[in-house]
Image: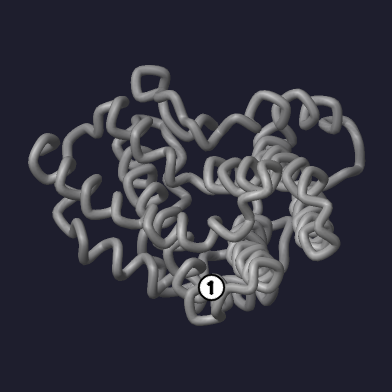
Amino acid sequence: MPKIDKEQKFFDFSDYGRGPAVFFSNLLKNSSVSPVQVTIWFGIIGILSAYAILLENYLIAGFGLILKSIVDAMDGELARIKESPSYSGRYLDSIFDSILNLIFIMVINYKSDSSYWLAFIAYIALQLQGTLYNYYYVILRHRTIGGDTTSKIFESKPPAAFPTESQTTVNILFHVFRVLYFPFDWVIYRFDASAFKIRQIPNWFMSMISIYGLGFQLMIMAIMLSMGFIEFIIPFFIGYSSLIIVFTLIRKLAIK
């Protein structure tokens, strides 16, 4: 099932890994590899990328971040190809993303001799940026006829597990997911609570917002690491958050 229909398809700057992800997922469609196993792969790739930063192998680290983005897109694609949806995989994917973002920021902080409070602010900035993108994307998907509506802005209780997964596992992962994401969801919702009333979100707006997608964030990190600008990464992402105000103002003024 597509996330959005063809008319609402937009150029997503953060989704550069989708093509390779579809290609490799099709290679795995008849294998015993599960989408959750792919999720674990990208978690391992993320850890190895962080370790490469610690070793100051910044080119390898940058490559790892891009590879992580590709493999990150593979688990969902493989689930769709194999027709094996999983709430466990969905929550595990998001949990890994949050934890890995924190790890990336902390190792970058360590190697650039930045202060830990600035690193924590940068982590919050990263999460808010990604949440803003996901907020509008979820609204767009709910406006799509036949689109993917499994994701929601606020989820108050665990969903009923699919037959192929454990309800206990879904419950545990849901509560971890909620702890990690609810504060950011609430903040972004307060920024633009009336967005749910939008009849249609223009493609140009979604393309603009997609520079806050995780894939694009990691690409920025990869480029800055490769260019030897590691000490500028944390202040960059803090300043990058100023666009949250710009984007929400554009939405409120130009998109009704």
Q: From the viewer's perspective, is 97 left or right of 20?
A: left
Q: Which residue is mark 1?
A: 119
Residue furthest to the top in view is: 7
Observer-nearest residue: 237 or 226? 226
Q: Quadrant of residue 164?
A: bottom right
At label 1, counting other C-alpha atoms closer than 10 Å, the crowd grade (few under 14, some 14-19, many 20 or more) is: many
Q: From the viewer's perspective, is 140 left or right of 60?
A: left
Residue 80 shows up from this direction: yes
Observer-nearest residue: 256 or 248? 248
The residue at the point 46 percent across, 40 percent down is 148
Q: Quadrant of residue 11?
A: top left
The residue at the point 8 percent across, 41 percent down is 253
Observer-nearest residue: 209 or 30? 209
The residue at the point 60 percent across, 75 percent down is 171
Report x, y in % for residue 70: 70, 38
Q: Secondary structure at mark 1?
A: helix
Report x, y in % for residue 191: 21, 61
